[in-house]
Each structure stands twice: as C-alpha cells, then as structure tokens.
Image (cartoon, helix red, strand yellow):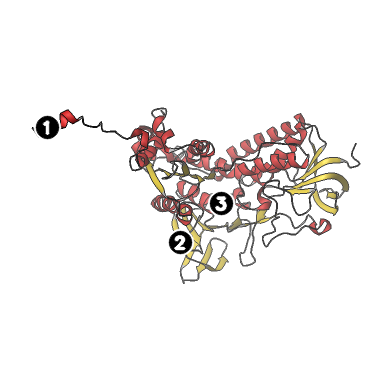
Amino acid sequence: MSSYDYDLIIIGSGPSGRSAAIQAGKLKRRVLVIDRKDRFGGVSVHTGTIPSKTLRETVLNLSGWRERSFYGRSYRVKDQIRAEDLKARLHMTLDHEVDVLEHQFNRNHVETLDGLARFVGPHEVEVATDAGETTRVTAAKFLIATGTKTYRPDYVPFKGKTVVDGDEFLEMAEIPRSLVVIGAGVIGVEYATMFSALDVRVTLIEPRDTFLDFIDSRLIHDFTHQIRENGVDLRLGSAVEKIEDAGEHVEVTLENGRHVRAEMLLFAAGRMGATSKLNLDAVGLETDHRNRIKVDRKTYQTAVPHIYATGDVIGHPSLASTSLQQGRVAACHALETPTLPESPWYPYGIYSVPEISTCGMSEEELQERNIPYEVGVARFRETSRGHIMGLEHGMLKMLFSLKTRRVLGVQIVGEGATELIHIAQAVLNLKGTVDYFVQNTFNYPTLAEAYKIAGLDAFNRMPIPEEFKVKKKPVEPAKKEAKKA
C-alpha cells in the first residue's frame, strides 16, 4: 500500500482531467479530482466548447439561417430572438453535461473535492474552499489540467456589460444591435460569424494582415468571401490604438485613424494558462510567457517526472478532442499501464458560420517540404444533397502525393465540415490513397459524396498507374506485310 492518500490527484475537471480520472478509475486506482468550481466540467463545459457550440446551434435554428437560400434572407423561425432564448437551450445542455460527468465519476469511483489547489510540497497540495476551510492531501502522481483563462490587457476597459471577454460574453443581458470583436482567432471568428447570422452588425478586427494562418490559404480565401458576403466587416492589419466605453456604446480607435462604434465589444485576443495560483515554485516547475507548461508530448510528463500536464495548459493544439486523448495517455503512463498511442493525424474544427475543418497537411506545408502533390476539389453545390439543402457555398479540398498516391491532407469549409472530416482522418491514419475515393461508393445523396468528386478530380490529372495503362498488342509480321501491300 502506498503511503500517500491517492495514487493520482488531478487538478482541473475539463476534458483532459475528466478523461484521466475515468481512466484511472477503470484501472482501480485511488484518484481525486480537485476543481475550484462547485460544478465540474471546466472551461469546456461552462464557458468554452459546449456553450459556444450550443449557442451556434441555437442561433442557426432560431434564425432559420439554413433555409434562407430557399425562402430569402428575411426568413425567420422566430421573429424576435432575445438573449433569454439563447440561454434557455444553453443552460439545459450544460446541466445535462454536468450530470453525465458526475455520473461517470461516481460509476468509476472517482473522488472529488471543490476548492483552489496549490502545491506545498513535491507530493502535497493544499486545497482552500469557498467557505474558508483548507485541507491537505498527498499523492504519488499529479496531473495538472487547469486549462486557460481569458487574456485581459490593461488597455481594455472591461466592464462586464459593454466591454467583455469570451467568458463574460455568454452572460449578456440582451443581444446587441452591433458588435465589435477584437481578435480573429478561433474564438473571435466563431462568435463574430454566429452573431452575423442573427443579423447583428459585426466588425471583426485583427491587428495582423492574415488570420487563422494554420488553415490552408485557399480555404481561408473561400471562407473570407463567405463571411463578408454574410455581413461581417473584416478589418485586417488594423491595430487597436484606444478603446473607450461611453456607456451606451463603445468607441474603438484604430492606428490607421479609423473609428468603429458598436453597442458591445468582445475582446477575444488570446488566452493564458491558468497556472498562476498553483504555486509551481514549490515543485520546481516553470511556465512560458503565456503561463503554459512544457511537457514531453508522448507521455505528458513535465520536467518533474511525477507531475504531468495535459489540455490547454500545455498549449497547441488546445482542442477538447485532443485533450481527451492526452488525459487518457497521461493517466496510463503515470500509473505504469501500457496503452495505445495517439493517432498521428487528428481533425481540427472551427465552429464558425460556415464551419471549417481540416486534417493532415495544408498546401503551404507541402510546398515548404517540396513534396510533389495533386489537388482535388469538390463544391457542395455539385452534389445532389447540396441542392436539396439549398447550399450555395461549401468546398472540400484534398491533397495527394504524386509519388505514393496517398492522401496528405483534407480541408473542408461549409455545412457539416466538422462531421465530414472524420472520413479523411480515417483514410489518412490508415495510409489510404486517392484510389480509395474512386473505388468506393458513397451514400447518395449525401455531402460525403464530395469526397468522390474531389477524388476523381485529382485522379483524372494524376499519372495513370502502370496496371491501368492500356497496353497495345504487338502487330504480327504477316499483318505488317499485308498492310504494306
């Protein structure tokens, strides 16, 4: 028996902490999850992934967005959409998520403790509760899964009403008529395009000349065209000089001299690792300029071998999906249990309007690596399912190696992109080729049929494999003489 209270203590109950706790429970180890909130789930459940995606679905349903190509831009399912309408579905979804999480913890004998944890020694943490009480617990191994918090620079006059960060945005009392979003990262782009679908006048400001640089540039070009057509005023290369909260509106002055006025401002320019209150000095751990922890990306061990870290607190890719995998792998390694490694290719999803999802390499990456490749493209309007759904936009792009014919990357923009990408992920991880998409039959009519269209598009331009070349039969000598005569 160990002399410690627990085999594993997990600080944070977001996707990676949750996954690690359940894995440790299934291994029949003594595990404790500590979270500063009285409701478990972390940022992902309460202010991040689940709320924003629920909000998106509510917006698209109540606004009638998906039907406007048939019935016109003025079409609405609900004429007057209020903040309460958005929050009603949000709270129902969050309650369900928390209930499922608590049931999973109970079923796997995972213990929980509410409070703020800080290290006081290599194997000991002190937990302070809201009631002012403190308790100390020890463990053989620790997993830090505290996630991130919003970046709040001093020059932004946050008031919680007219000037808000990504966490406060969900608590809005009413839907603004106009909105300024500063930061064209994933969060900023998602909220900007969602509220544009509600016919809110949205200005999206990004100090850099480009945005979402990790996405294939052709896809971003198509996406930019769509969101501008949908009403988003995209200001690239526009650094913010000053933000003034006038009460009834917010005034933003840009360095180029232009002004933007709106009823509400959402500041979404980055997040910081939530590590400042962990007292990491007590265990000899350091963080980078964004308070993130460096780890071994195969085991998720930190510089201190018995302490692990997973999820957004370790930085890129900062996805709920990858965090779930990281938590499982870290728990198995910490508890000395062999397990399957993570797949080399994972999908990236941006739940904007329209959706973006990618897996594998982009065209820019292939060019940097000097890999000969061919491109196959399909437009959703080329599919019968696209006609049925009234899709005017949407594109699926595939990249194939000219040498091996293998799939190297897939990028999708449009309705259902985050669901469709998993076909590409499977083929990538199984080292499939362009031939798979040509040989196989897809349900008809479906958007997935776009894979076959894009596959044939590339196949028809690629070198013909030797076994499929038409071989001319040699002409017999007697026939040659007959021809001469």
Q: Is residue 71 visible?
A: no
- Please give the label number shown on residue 235: 2
- 16 on left or right of 110: left
Mark 2–mark 3 distance (CA, rounded to whole Å): 16 Å
Mark 2–mark 1 distance (CA, rounded to whole Å): 73 Å
Mark 1–mark 3 distance (CA, rounded to whole Å): 74 Å
| Amino acid at pointer 2 | Arg
Quarter of image, res 32? top right
What SS does tag 2 mark? Answer: strand
Label 1: which residue? 483
- 195 on left or right of 89: left
What SS does tag 3 mark? Answer: helix
| Residue nearer the viewer, 313 or 402 | 402
Q: Is 156 drawn above or below residue 232 in the view shown?
A: below
Quarter of image, res 18? top right
Q: Is 203 drawn above or below residue 351 in the view shown?
A: below
| Amino acid at pointer 1 | Lys
